[in-house]
Image (tube, helix red, strand yellow):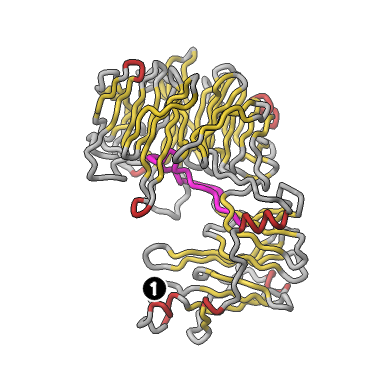
Amino acid sequence: MTSIMDPTLRGTGRITGAFFNPAGDIAAVVSEFALLVNPPARAAYGGTGLRYRLGLYRRGEPVPFAIFDELCLPINDVGFHPTLPRIVIGAGRYDGGYLFEGELAVWNWQTGQSRRPFADIPEVARCRYDASGERIEAWVRPWNEEWDGLDDSDWSVILDTLFLVQADDSEATWATRTPPVLELDPAATVAASGLAADDQRPPAMRLAHWLGLPELACRGAIRDIAWLGPDRLGVTRDGCLLDIYGTDGSRLAHYGGSGYGAEILRGAGVHVHGVQVQDGPEAYRRDSRLYALTDNGLVLVQEYDDEYTFSAARDGRLLGRRNRLRSPGSKAVDLLLDPARDNVQPVDIGHYDCFNHYIGISGAPHLFALQGTPASSHEHKYLCIVQPDGTVQRLWPLLKQDGTRASHAMECRGAYVADTLGASVVIAGQHYNPSVGDAYQGFIYRRHLERGQELWRHPTPASPSAIVHLPEAGLVAAAFLDGTLMLIDARSGQLRLNAKARIDGLPTLIHAMDAHAGQLALGTVDGRIAVKSVADLLGAGNTRGWVEIG
């Protein structure tokens, strides 16, 4: 196994907070992991298993000795118990419309046990233990915009008002199975501006100072990864358009510029889809750039004032699909590019939105797309081939159209597979369900390309992030957003590996993956790159329920 480009602190996402125990020898590092919105005209959230983490680090040790991944909302504050291995964690946010959602948890990092002092709580802005360690004090927002009886005539006062909440954290409370219902006291309010101010330096700066370093080596999620030869890897991530690494860990090339690299397209050559982030009032706009990797470096091919996702055929043709949700008034349509002939042809394959029409198949003999029925719809989706002249050949529906919600496929990902069984595709995705409380239901199957015959199928626990074919091993590798990594026999469909991925012993999510000569290059949500042989992965087995990829 090769591990490349390691950060200073392992197992972190975007670091959003740093807190220190009273002795100053332990740091609680709070981080947020990116959702899968790469490339920008793609979005997959179903079953995501890792969003917010609190990791405990000792000075000089890059790997946390304990982690807490059980919160669903951004972590705002952390308080250490004065004497015990216990932490109170406050989390929450405004939901954008009405509610102040919150979480308050107490965690014993030695036993791994945790508890919630209340059945429900609004957004927690601050939390602390008192000097005895027997009580917790938390300062929270109101439940919702009705402000819980406060005078709302002065909004500046309202927005500065927090409710003081107190909770017992004696040993007896840990035996209580049913947490009490919280009632806010309108008389127990404080001004947020009056609370003692935290250290205002960025958390990464405070951590670097604590570690005695000039700065932290931090990195966001790996956006894409591709083999560029037997011993070279291309990587896209925040902060650059493309990095090229040797499998020995050495960086061979770095291509910076405006924006960041989103996806690496392998056809007759190598193209990089870059994203330009706008400033000012259009800060959320993501305009696309297409680059070609040449002997002279990374060369800009074209700029697009809109949001696209691209795929590449083996002969070098490229298909750009425009996200219709981002700029509804734009006159731009899809694009069919033939770089060898310096030809760009506008085409209209139909409606495209980031949840319904991404398929992500590149390096195949054909350009693939998903198309609704009619083409202006997102429903009743068909797998299609876009011919060199721009015409669309419909193959077969992604799911059996039985009139149920489960026949609506979302958040899909595919891969082309050709072996003795013939030309096929493997497609994974989600059975649509509008009820957020219901368990996730997903699928992965292999179908013959022309006949549509299904060769095998499995249920899946989360939406797919990456799928690749390993022809030398006769396997299909598929990664999912709950951390699951599957290795599937491409012919029989037998599950050879079905386990949660870990790196340095810590749960992680694989966002990007590519295969070469029986080796998988894996890019994770916590900014790590690992190269792992399939033989090693299979040798780990399924008995533990997880597999070490680092």
> Residue 275 location, x and y as percent?
41, 39
On screen, 134 above or below 386?
Answer: below
Q: Residue at x 47, y 21 (%)?
A: 294
Q: Secondary structure at mark 1?
A: loop
Q: Is residue 422 left or right of residue 198?
A: left
Please identify the dominant SS of the magenta region: loop
> Residue 198 location, x and y as percent?
61, 69
Q: Residue furthest top?
A: 420
Residue marked by disc 1: 145
Q: Which residues are magenta?
A: 30-50
Split into 4 quadrants, where in the image is the C terminus? top right
Q: Residue at x 65, y 49 (%)?
A: 216
On screen, 157 above or below 477?
Answer: below
In which quarter of the view is residue 27 placed? Answer: bottom right
Q: Residues within 10 Å of mark 1 (few under 14, many from 20)?
A: some
Looking at the image, how many numbered discs can be counted on the residues?
A: 1
Give whichever of 522, 475 is nearer the camera.
522
Does the magenta run of residues contain 114?
Answer: no
Give whichever of 102, 381 is nearer the camera.
102
In which quarter of the view is residue 336 placed? Answer: top left
Q: Is residue 426 visible?
A: no
Split into 4 quadrants, where in the image is the N terminus? top right
> Residue 160 location, x and y as percent?
47, 76
On screen, 74 above or below 10?
Answer: below
Does the magenta run of residues contain 41?
Answer: yes
Give whichever of 323, 503 is nearer the camera.
323
Q: Is residue 21 left or right of residue 515?
A: right
On screen, 58 above or below 312?
Answer: below
Q: Amino acid at mark 1?
A: Glu
Q: Is residue 195 visible?
A: yes
> Residue 167 location, x and y as percent?
62, 76
